[in-house]
Image: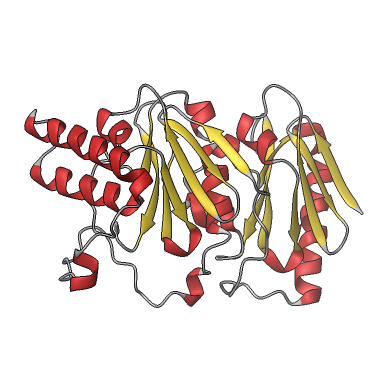
């Protein structure tokens, strides 16, 4: 077995799997410690390099495109320090790092692992249920449904729509952008009905606006990854999702008529619609925002 143990974490390779365990030192980002140990099968690896630097070096594992739901959900936007596939190496352990990298490269060559994009996820992503409290509210995922409960500091528009519950079959895509500390981020759940929505994250009832602690808001990537792992693999998509700036298709008569609310929800629905109407009259919501948010409320019931 090839193994390197550092304050930043431990990498161990047994010929079939690269087992990555985050370090427990306070310098290790909260995201990596929360994500926990990752077992990367050799077939998911594209390459590995050791990058020596003046004070410290870095081991870097590159995975095949489409092999990991974490990389698919975050789109390369994870801060370097939070990237679980990087290991900071002290200079006196550079020889060990080179050996580990060489052993992985040799196995890739012997097993003739392809570098082409994977046709399915080869890593499972984080286990469920998973729940994260962010600056805009709490988002939870149990493997079948996403639930968003807004915080007291959420925009009035979102609080007026009430908790958001989304079934996995209704989801098309998850969009995630981290809170950098300088610019806000967001976690958006795109459904077939909301694919054309142009609401900003702070008003979108299907999105969390990430504006608080960058360290804690980064944990929303756990939910993004867990949901992404349960959506159809990108290689199977048929192009039914269109970006928000695509031309809007006409609604069918069935789509244009909202479902009739259940009697027990009727009072809640009316109250939320009245609240949205007040926000519209006060100028908080534009005509387009009011229409989109009203539709989201109706769909929720």
Residue at the (27%, 51%) spot, across then down:
298
Residue at the (35%, 37%) spot, across then down:
162
> What sort of colour scheme is used for the picture?
secondary structure
Callout count: 0
Along the line of sight, the residue nearer the viewer: 158 or 247: 158
The percent position of residue 106, horizontal first and vertical second, equals 80, 66
Q: Residue 119 occupies which quadrant of the picture?
A: bottom right
Q: Residue 161 occupies which quadrant of the picture?
A: top left
Q: Residue most toward the front? A: 263
Residue at the (24%, 67%) spot, across then down:
255
* Residue 8 visible in this rendered orientation of the protein: yes
Q: Which quadrant: the N terminus?
A: bottom right
* Residue 198 visible in this rendered orientation of the protein: no
Please state if 293 lies on the left or on the right of 230 as rendered: left
Along the line of sight, the residue nearer the viewer: 189 or 112: 189
Q: Residue most toward the right? A: 1
Along the line of sight, the residue nearer the viewer: 154 or 135: 154
The percent position of residue 88, horizontal first and vertical second, equals 69, 36
Whether 181 is drawn above or below 147: the answer is above
The percent position of residue 259, horizontal first and vertical second, equals 29, 60
Along the line of sight, the residue nearer the viewer: 220 or 113: 220
Residue at the (16%, 67%) spot, across then down:
247
Please state if 72 lies on the left or on the right of 64 as rendered: left
The percent position of residue 212, horizontal first and vertical second, equals 42, 24
């Amino acid at each position: 077995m090839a193994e390197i143990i550092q304050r930043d974490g431990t990498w161990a390779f047994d010929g079939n799997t690269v087992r990555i365990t985050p370090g427990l030192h306070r310098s290790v980002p909260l995201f990596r410690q929360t994500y926990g140990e990752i077992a990367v099968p050799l077939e998911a690896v594209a390459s590995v390099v050791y990058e020596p630097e003046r004070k410290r070096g870095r081991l870097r594992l590159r995975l095949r495109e489409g092999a990991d739901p974490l990389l698919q959900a975050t789109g390369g936007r994870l801060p370097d320090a939070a990237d679980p596939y990087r290991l900071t190496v002290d200079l006196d352990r550079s020889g060990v790092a080179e050996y580990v990298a060489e052993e992985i490269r040799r196995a890739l060559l012997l097993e003739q692992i392809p570098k082409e994009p994977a046709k399915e996820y080869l890593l499972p992503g984080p286990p469920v249920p998973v729940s994260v409290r962010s600056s805009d509210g709490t988002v939870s995922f149990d493997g079948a449904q996403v639930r968003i409960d807004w915080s007291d500091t959420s925009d009035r528009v979102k609080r007026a729509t009430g908790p958001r519950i989304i079934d996995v079959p209704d989801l098309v895509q998850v969009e995630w952008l981290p809170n950098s500390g300088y610019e806000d981020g967001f976690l958006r759940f795109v459904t077939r009905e909301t694919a054309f929505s142009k609401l900003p994250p702070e008003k979108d009832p299907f999105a969390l606006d990430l504006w608080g602690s960058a360290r804690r808001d980064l944990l929303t990537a756990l939910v993004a990854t867990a949901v992404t792992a349960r959506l159809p693999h990108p290689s199977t998509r048929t192009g039914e999702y269109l970006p928000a700036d695509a031309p809007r298709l006409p609604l069918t008569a069935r789509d244009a008529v909202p479902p009739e609310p259940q009697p027990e929800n009727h009072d809640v629905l009316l109250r939320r619609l009245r609240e949205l109407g007040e926000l519209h009259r006060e100028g908080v919501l534009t005509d387009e925002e009011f229409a989109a948010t009203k539709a989201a409320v109706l769909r929720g019931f």
